[in-house]
Amino acid sequence: MSLLDLLFGSKPKTASVAKERLQLIIARERSDNGPSADYLPALQKDLVAVISKYVKVNPDDIKVSLEKQDNYEVLEVNIVLPDAARAV
């Protein structure tokens, strides 16, 4: 490191600048395309398996959705429980 680098600071490395730009581009593309729901069917299947351990529930009564609200992605899970499970 030279004396000039100490006084004026060094320029950021090209690789780190490129990485930062790529991250910004990816983040922007994700936000422009809306919420990605690729994993929702697998998540719904896992939820049915876990909930079925404790409550007898119809798999069609579990709905999973992903919505974009303002700057946030909201994961919503709706489960219709049978009457016997509601009493517990």
Image (cartoon, helix red, strand yellow):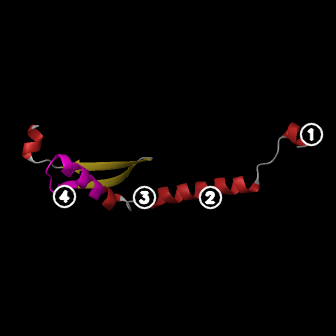
Q: Are marks 4 and 2 in contact (CB under 8 Å)?
A: no
Chain-order first, disc 3 or disc 4: 3
Question: In front here: 64 or 85?
Answer: 85
Amino acid type, callout 1:
Leu
Work out which quarter of the rendered image holds the N terminus and state it: top right
| Residue designated by label 3 | 34
| Residue designated by label 4 | 59
Amino acid type, callout 2:
Leu
Cα distance, mark 1 to mark 2? Answer: 32 Å
Residue 87 located left or right of residue 32: left
Chain-order first, disc 1 or disc 4: 1
Frontmost of labels 1 and 3 is 1
Q: Residues within 10 Å of mark 4 (few under 14, many from 20)?
A: some
Chain-order first, disc 1 or disc 3: 1
Looking at the picture, how far across and down is residue 77, in whole percent?
A: 27, 49
Cα distance, mark 1 to mark 3? Answer: 49 Å
Q: Quadrant of residue 39?
A: bottom left
Q: Residues within 10 Å of mark 2 (few under 14, many from 20)?
A: few
Cα distance, mark 3 to mark 4? Answer: 27 Å
Magenta extent:
44-62
Q: Are marks 1 and 2 in contact (CB under 8 Å)?
A: no
